[in-house]
Image (cartoon, grey):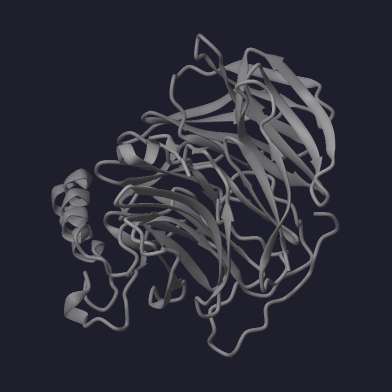
């Protein structure tokens, strides 16, 4: 399971029309690739079924400014999540009632609620195929539910979930893929019916599945093992030991991040692509030699012993004390056509080339405080990488807390801007969104909309 610090409540004291703006960097620069005229919205956590965190239709940025906020204004209200569809932002919340509320994504004008259910706390939501999907918890009984509504709030279906925990869900191929405990389940977007369920090799923790190339990929923890299932039938496709349980996928490759480092695998069959290596270190200093990764020898051992858990334990142990990437423990990532951007727990972010796993640059989001870390998945687009970070420091009687959003150049890691976000409480894992010319951060107390300038 994730460390306790990942779950603890942090108490702090102190897009209209699609935008088309290709990134033109110098030859060899690490950018987010050419943009095309595609959906400028952000319809689910991670932005797409691979949870890549990449927005191909995003404005280049030199700086950021707060455009508007939507605070939690009702008694005991907590913001649950947000998505952007066709210039409208949908925000979920819970408190006296579970609510999905709409805002103009550019101006912040309150367009009113479309769903209001007493006694519910609404969490993460998605809007796919003109269907609003939201997971909720009953106040008091803690019963979990999954429901779907039309864009005007008409309930299409609702189902009671069989478990008391949730690792999150991802929508793709007409299905809602949800992890909970040691199982992944597929629900039909059309009617909520269970299409299939599959057992995992261990607990999924708070790691949601990703979807790519007709497969559902779900990682389990302790040790990290990645399982692949046919998205339509749930039939197992392959299973293997990996470097970590946090996943993102794009263009036929799935990237795993965790105590074992950062590694890339083929979605189709789980084959090794690479494990991240820093060109400034010698071959002998990095696991697996010239970037081949920790599993090159481990795979042969697996064939002899047929013991994937033992393989994963050996691989993880061999890497857990080696910071090859230069960010500390890799926590979250976002991937473009050219690079995987990884946020670690040591106040740093790194760009890793998707072609060969080499580290192109590292940047610092930390302030040099006692704690500089991130509990949130970054996003990228328009040649910019966005990272939300939490900072804590004690100097004598001075106790300081700070949460901020930092924009890095995807090409070379330069800090383009840093904006402080005023929060009294955060839970961790709140969604960061990138849509057109705006960045949105939906946390417990309020939703921030920041304009790219």
**Is residue 337 in sight in this rendering?**
yes
Question: Is residue 38 found left or right of 94 in the rendered image?
Answer: right
The residue most toward the bottom is: 27
The residue most toward the top is: 141
Q: Image point 32% across, 77% down: which residue?
A: 278
> Residue 296 at what x, y percent from top left?
24, 65
Q: Which of 101 and 129 is in front in this view?
A: 101
Picture quarter with the C terminus:
bottom right
Question: Is residue 22 found left or right of 18 in the rendered image?
Answer: left
Q: Which of 430 and 198 is in front in this view?
A: 430
- The answer to which quarter of the image holds residue 445 is top right
* Whether residue 264 is situated above or below residue 208 in the rendered picture: below
**Is residue 2 in sight in this rendering?**
no
- The answer to which quarter of the image holds residue 26 is bottom right
Picture quarter with the N terminus:
top left
> Residue 441 at what x, y percent from top left?
62, 48
């Amino acid at each position: 399971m994730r460390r306790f610090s990942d779950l603890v409540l942090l108490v702090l004291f102190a897009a209209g029309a699609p935008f088309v703006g290709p990134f033109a960097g110098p030859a060899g620069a690490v950018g987010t690739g050419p943009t095309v005229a595609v959906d400028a919205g952000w319809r689910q956590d991670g932005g797409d079924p691979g949870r890549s965190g990449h927005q191909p239709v995003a404005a280049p940025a030199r700086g950021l400014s707060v455009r508007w906020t939507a605070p939690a204004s009702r008694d005991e209200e907590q913001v649950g999540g947000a998505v952007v569809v066709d210039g409208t932002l949908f925000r979920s919340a819970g408190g006296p009632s579970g609510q999905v509320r709409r805002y103009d994504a550019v101006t912040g004008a309150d367009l009113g609620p479309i769903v209001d259910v007493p006694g519910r706390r609404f969490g993460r939501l998605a809007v796919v195929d003109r269907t609003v999907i939201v997971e909720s918890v009953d106040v008091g009984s803690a019963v979990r539910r999954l429901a779907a509504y039309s864009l005007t709030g008409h309930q299409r279906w609702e189902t009671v979930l069989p478990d008391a925990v949730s690792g999150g869900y991802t929508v793709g191929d007409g299905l809602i893929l949800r992890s909970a405990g040691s199982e992944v389940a597929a629900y039909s977007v059309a009617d909520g019916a269970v299409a299939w369920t599959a057992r995992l090799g261990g607990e999924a923790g708070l790691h949601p599945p990703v979807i790519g190339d007709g497969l559902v990929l779900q990682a389990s923890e302790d040790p990290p093992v990645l399982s692949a299932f046919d998205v339509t039938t749930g039939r197992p496709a392959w299973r293997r030991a990996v470097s970590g349980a946090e996943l993102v996928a794009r263009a036929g490759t799935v990237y795993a991040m965790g105590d074992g480092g950062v590694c890339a695998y083929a979605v189709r069959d789980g084959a090794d692509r690479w494990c991240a290596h820093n060109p400034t270190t010698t071959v002998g200093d990095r696991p697996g030699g010239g970037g081949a990764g920790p599993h090159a020898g481990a795979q042969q051992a697996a064939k002899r012993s047929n013991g994937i858990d033992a393989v994963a334990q050996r691989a993880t142990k061999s890497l857990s004390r080696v910071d090859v990437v230069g960010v500390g423990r890799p926590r979250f990532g976002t991937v473009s056509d050219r690079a995987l951007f990884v946020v670690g727990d040591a106040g740093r972010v790194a760009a890793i080339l998707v072609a060969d796993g080499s580290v192109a640059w590292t940047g610092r989001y930390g302030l040099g405080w006692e704690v500089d870390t991130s509990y949130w998945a970054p996003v990228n687009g328009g040649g910019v990488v966005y990272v939300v970070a939490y900072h804590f420091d004690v100097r004598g009687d001075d106790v300081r807390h700070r949460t901020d959003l930092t924009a890095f150049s995807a090409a070379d890691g330069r800090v383009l801007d840093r904006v402080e976000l005023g929060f009294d409480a955060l839970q961790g894992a709140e969604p960061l969104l990138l849509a057109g010319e705006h960045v949105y951060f939906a946390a417990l107390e309020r939703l921030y909309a920041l304009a790219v300038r």
